[in-house]
Amino acid sequence: MIDMNNINVLALAYLGDSVYEVYIRSFLINKGIVNVNELQNEAIKYVSANGQAKFLDMLLNENFLTEDEIDIVKRGRNHKSHKAPKNTSVSVYKNATGFETLIGYLYLDNNIKRIEEIIKYIESK
């Protein structure tokens, strides 16, 4: 069994980024978008650091996350990382990393139901 508290948060964020992107791509295709360029343009609104940080802010401001989930987000957000990618502020990058960490954590914890609740919340915005 994996001790979730000892997993590198950047590894959780790495996994969470991939899991989240699959959900968003599926959501966009199910919306009827079939043109690849349009899919990519729409996906960026959700999977970019800016998009992820925006949705994390909404989840936090609307008290959607549990205390345990907020702790996971903080672990990811507070991790010392290298500088943010260009076109993204450090705070946005850290918030996006916190969001990705949460998704990766939930996925490894096999809490798919909770991931889907978060995705449905995001899709409704």
Image (cartoon, helix red, strand yellow):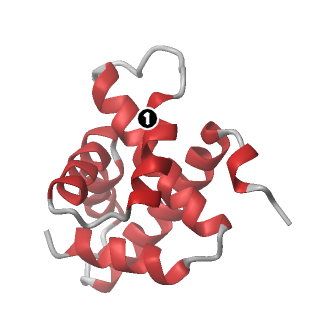
Image position of 44 with respect to 92: above or below: below
The quadrant in which residue 19 appears is: bottom right
Residue drawn 81% across and 60% down? 2
Between residue 41 and residue 67, name the one nearer to us: 67
Residue at the far front in the pictured view:
67
**Quadrant of the drawing holding the N terminus:** bottom right
How many C-alpha atoms fall within 10 Å of the one at disc 1: few (<14), some, or many (≥20)? many
Is residue 75 left or right of 29 when viewed as pictured?
right
Which residue position holds label 1? Answer: 77
Between residue 28 and residue 92, name the one nearer to us: 92
The quadrant in which residue 94 appears is: top left
Is residue 103 left or right of 43 when viewed as pictured?
right
Where is residue 33 drawn, in percent x and y? 26, 76
Is residue 96 left or right of 20 when viewed as pictured?
left
Where is residue 63 drawn, in percent x and y? 21, 62
Residue drawn 32% across and 85% down? 30
Image position of 11 with respect to 21: above or below: above
The quadrant in which residue 10 appears is: top right
Where is residue 13 drawn, in percent x and y? 56, 46
User: Which residue type does callout 1 highlight?
Assistant: Arg
Is residue 74 left or right of 106 when viewed as pictured?
left
Between residue 41 and residue 104, name the one nearer to us: 104
**Quadrant of the drawing holding the C terminus:** bottom left
Residue drawn 46% across and 14% down? 83
Residue at the far top in the pictured view:
83
Which SS class for mark 1? Answer: helix
Residue drawn 34% across and 38% down? 95
How many numbered marks are there? Answer: 1
Where is residue 101 drawn, in percent x and y? 52, 49
